[in-house]
Amino acid sequence: MFGAMKHVAVVALVLVMAAGCGVQDETVPTTSAGPVETAAATSVPTPATTATTSLPPTTTITTRAPTGDGPLNAIEDGIGDPYYPELGNSGYDVAHYTLDLVFDPESDILTGNVTIDAVATSDLHTFNLDFIGFEIEEVLVDASIADFARTEEELTIRPGTVIPQGESFDVSVFYSGTPQPLASAAISFGVGWSTSPSGQRYVVAEPDGARSWYPANDHPLDKATYTFLVTVPDPLFAAANGTLTDMVTDLGQTTFVWEMADPMAPYLATVVIGDYTLVVDEVSTDLAGVPVRNVLPPDLRDAVPDAVLRQGEMIDFFAELFGPYPFDAYGIAVVDGFPAALETQTMVVFGRPLLNELVIVHELAHQWFGNHVSPGRWQDIWLNEGFASYAEWLWIEASLGIEGVAVGITQERDRFVGSGLAPPGSPPPDDLFNASVYRIGAMTLHALRLSVGDEAFFDTLRTYVARFGGGTATTDDFIAVAEEVSGQDLDALFEAWLFGDDVPEFPVG
Ligand SMILES: [Zn+2]
């Protein structure tokens, strides 16, 4: 994320801009008439249709014991995050989400059919999903109607029969209502489904807003793959994470099908709806080795900003330092008025006011740090923000050299001395994205680099990404990799920088 933190003065740096970047825009049509059978297959089914067309093998049901039919009370649950104990759930592991969503901007009604494929990690008499708002019409478990009950934040589901540990099951939740952002436990502005001043819809859900628009196991510890089927009236465009695999137009509306084939934390799922065009950046695609495509409003489509056109060069640059770019595609979706940006996996939701080179670098670096390797607990958010902020310094270094960075980062360190901010390793739970996790987090990495030298430092970053990519890591995991790679005892360095009362001096490199 960028832009939620308290304002801090930023070192003024003149970046040497590469000249001569061209781009060939390839505009993907926003509508296409798909074959009839495809349209039928991707239209939103009614609950009754789903229930009658996808019954599971009867053996699955007959081998299970009934769960009982007494009153069901919703129970509070959580996956065990010390900062936000209500987030996430235990008892199952999600493999895949299918978000089949119909949105009507006129009525502001979102109609959802979300199917979750999961594996039980214990015998399940009941289980919970995180979900806030909406009217729930029906819940199906393995295509059979299931009882459910709700609190403000939890949806408790009782399948008709006990789901044994180790067994796969699917749960479908049919719901509708007007989506809106919710008050986050971690930051001072609403997270989740939002509306821009010009009427675009977008989702930025870090850290706890996924549950504001779809039922989820809302914690990075349970990453999963995703399919999005987003139906909107023509001529609107709907973007989501991953690759656009199909567009089906029927009766004046189009269903956009997006596939996220790599594991993704629930907070990184997004949908962006508006008067947009998907613009493929061919030059960046060549440099990056993966499709670079941006979702742009009309004025930017016709005049793509220079900094946006450097994303392929940036991917190539960071792949050298961090390891191969971890996903199948990359790009940004620009939203009017939004005063921040969020690194939503492969499709960054980018507030137009922040559309500048260093924020573009920051969000790209999150694809490795935050998205591919996600925080195992929210206290360790510096593993996202400190690393993305240090990536800004690395990009600056490419232009100004290490001497320029040394001067700038030392000046910045001096400004943070005596700031009174909590150290980056233990940020306040109600102010998670404060400047310390970004800037002192970045300084922590610079201190590590000065201590162990460039070779061990970048080897540490690549080893950490390779080892924990696709999953999660904690601060202790990172420290262990740094010690393993460097052969040094680094406890004192990390203790001082991540948990000390004030900002330490940089080691003499
Ligand atoms: Zn960030």
Image (cartoon, helix red, strand yellow):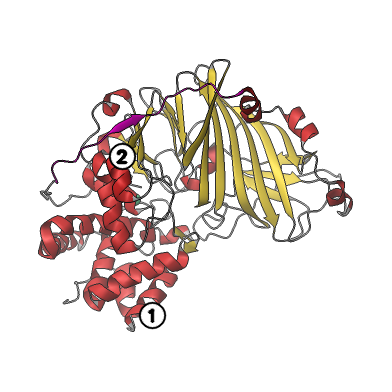
Q: Do the residues labelled 1 and 2 touch (CB within 8 Å)?
A: no
The answer to whether the residue bearing label 2 lies less than 8 angstroms from the nearest atom of ligand 1 is no
Among the 4 quarters of the image, the one containing residue 168: bottom right
State the image coordinates of residue 268 (x, y, percent, origin top left): 46, 46
Is the CB atom of the residue marked by disc 1 within 8 angstroms of ligand 1's nearest atom?
Answer: no
Between the residue at mark 1 and the residue at mark 2, the CA separation in whole angstroms equals 40 Å
9 or 107: nearer the eye?
Answer: 107
* Residue 412 image offset from top left, x and y in percent: 17, 59
- Where residue 252 sits in the image (x, y, percent)? 54, 15
Amino acid type at image mark 2: Glu
- How many other residues sit within 10 Å of disc 2, few (<14), some (14-19) or many (≥20)? some
Q: Give the range drawn in magenta.
A: 18-35
Identify the residue under disc 2. 282
Q: In this view, does 183 lie to the left or right of 456?
A: right
Above or below, 411 relative to 99: below
- Name the residue tied to disc 1: 484
- Please tell me in which quadrant of the rendered image residue 302 appears: top left
Q: Is mark 2 on a helix, strand or loop?
A: helix
Check the image and report above or below for 202 versus 2: above
Three-letter residue code for mark 1: Glu
Secondary structure, magenta segment, majority class: loop
Magenta run includes residue 232: no
Q: Is residue 265 left or right of residue 320?
A: right
Residue 351 drawn above or below residue 388:
above
Residue in the picture at 42% in, 62% down:
380
